[in-house]
Image (cartoon, grey):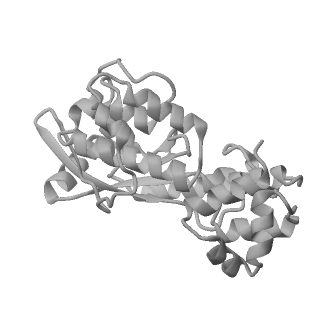
Amino acid sequence: MAEVGELLKHWRSARRLSQLALASAAAVSVRHLCFVETGRSNPSRSMVLKLADVLDVPLRERNTLLLSAGFSPEYQESALDEPALGAVRDALATILAQQEPFPALVMDRSWDIRSTNAAARRFFAFLQDGKTETPPGPANVLRRMFHPDGVRQHIANWPEVAEALVRRARREAVGGVTDERAQRILEEVLDYPGVPAGLRSLDVTAPVLPIVPIRYVHADRQFDYFSTVTTLGTPQDVTLQELRIECFFPMNDETRSAAHQLAAPRSSGR
């Protein structure tokens, strides 16, 4: 495991802060911060947590910082199906249900899909249209979007969407949660047939559009969606902080109408 000073320097660089800026924000001396980063001084538990808070370090990595400094972890990592998280699961289910008849899903930091609403299941079943071929491994957003047997074949503006996804994945790895499994999956999908080699060398610091439309086309129908990604506010559990709620919204009346039509058979049977 890396020394705590090296890890703090990594996060300071990721946040693009000078030693002076970090020291000022954390109310410590530049000299002491320099000693901590170079290993000449051992920070206290409270100092590690204070610096991590200023640097907005994710909870999982805060635990890593504490362990590297010789302290026990601060934040619990619960399984999402544990009884203690029952209220959170109910809240997530409510959010997904409220998004009907438009798709919504919950994913973890590795981009694995943890749950979906009925609209998402209907929509992606419609795109699959009875086909049994699916991307390998657990249901994963990156695999679903990049694999030839996923939904990629139905996305009219796939190059634009693929570039936006790679930028997002790279940005999260640099300035958010550094998940080795997510990086392995990203490398895997970049090796899929037909994926442009140029996606490997994208400049993740370049400005990106706040909204990237996704145009799905299948069976003479077109669905124009944009999505938003939401996180849970002020979580104190590693698992909860790493969840992402992605909701799809129609960009025009045609998509809104088509989504209601997909839902019609289910609602008519009530």
Which percent across, then down, holds residue 50?
Answer: 76, 71
Which percent across, then down, holds residue 28?
Answer: 77, 78
Q: Is residue 90 left or right of residue 120?
A: right
Q: Is residue 253 left or right of residue 26?
A: left
Residue at point 29%, 29% (across, down): 195
Q: Give the camera-side residue of 194 and 239.
A: 194
Outermost residue, left side: 220
Q: Give the camera-side residue of 71 and 22.
A: 22
Quadrant of res 38: bottom right
Which percent across, then down, holds residue 266?
Answer: 32, 42
- Whether residue 191 is visible here, answered yes or no, is yes
Q: Quadrant of the N terminus?
A: top right
Residue at point 41%, 50% (across, down): 168
Quadrant of res 154: top left
Circle count = 0
Residue at point 89%, 55% (across, down): 71
Quadrant of res 12: bottom right
Residue at point 73%, 76% (across, down): 30
- Vertical comparison of 110 with 65: above or below: above
